[in-house]
Image: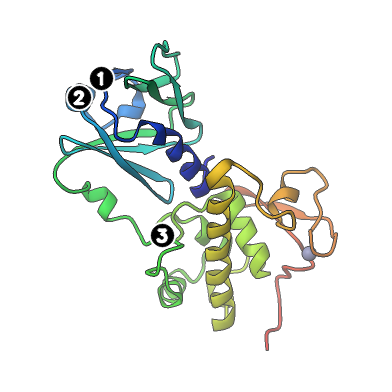
Amino acid sequence: MPELAEVEYFRKRWDSGLGQRVREIALHGEKRIFRGSDPAEIERTLRGATLRSSETHGKQMLFRFSKNAWLGLHLGMTGKLRVEPAGFEPGRHDHLVLFQRKQALVFADARMFGRVRFHHGKSAPAWWAKLPPAVTSPQFTTARLREIFLRRRTAPLKALLLAQDVFPGVGNWMADEILWQARLDPRISAAQLDAKQTREVWRAARMVCRVALKTIGVDWSDPPGDWLMLQRWKKGGRCPRDGKLLQRATIAGRTTAWCPNCQPSHRKTG
Ligand SMILES: [Zn+2]
């Protein structure tokens, strides 16, 4: 499932269409990725509109067009953005295609857990304005995290890291990476954290998001070789710090990998 850095990578695929008009549109309006929006309105408004800019927030993308048109895209589990030549014939999973003079901007989604949203108005849609602070933003403070941890005292840390209203854009591998970087057991609850450990979660979350955006988010390159991420996919993956065999379990409904040595369930802090 795409997490914030992968989403950022896909958003940039459409950059070659910036400043260019949409001449024609092909869409599969009956597909569920258009739930809650009006495909006819999307076609009518986007035809003749120019792509002005785009932005990523967590797992959400927003494309701004002229004619006060806004296109929100969510990749779900299998969504992808790509660019094809102008004469391209859409395939069965290419649910939204914007044809420009030089190229076609394609949104494909085989399993259709993704979503297309449309908004017509002078400012960004309300759902966009209401998104929680990005992990890399100045609004994402330790005070905010402390307050959330006080309210959700009993949830395992892994579940909190996957909560999109707290850590927007963080998914399964990033959550494991953050916990490994912060040296915290994924099963412990927020109530078990002292102030110093909460600060560690905050620091690790910002670092992992920032570095992932600079590597995967730019050109799909790997994050640093000493991260957990590169080991957690492997059968028999080992901790990059101490070579201990990674432990695995399903936590908060997701396969979780951690190092029993670096991330002990009971840790003395001083
Ligand atoms: Zn370790």
Residue tagged 3: 134
Judge left or right: residue 190 versus residue 240: left
Determine whether the residue tagged by mark 1 lies in a helix, strand or loop.
loop
**Between disc 2 and disc 3, whose residue precedes?**
2
106 is higher (above) or lower (below) than 122: above
Closest to the observer, 243 or 70: 70
246 is higher (above) or lower (below) than 77: below
Q: Quadrant of the C terminus?
A: bottom right
Question: Residue 144 at x, y = what percent?
Answer: 40, 73
Question: Residue 256 at x, y = what percent?
Answer: 66, 52
Determine whether the residue tagged by mark 3 lies in a helix, strand or loop.
loop
3D distance between C-alphas at marks 1 and 2: 6 Å
Residue tagged 2: 48
Q: Amino acid at mark 3?
A: Ala
Q: Amino acid at mark 1?
A: Arg
Residue 194, by quadrant, is bottom right
User: Which residue is painted at 47% across and 72% down in the image?
Assistant: 149
Residue tagged 1: 23
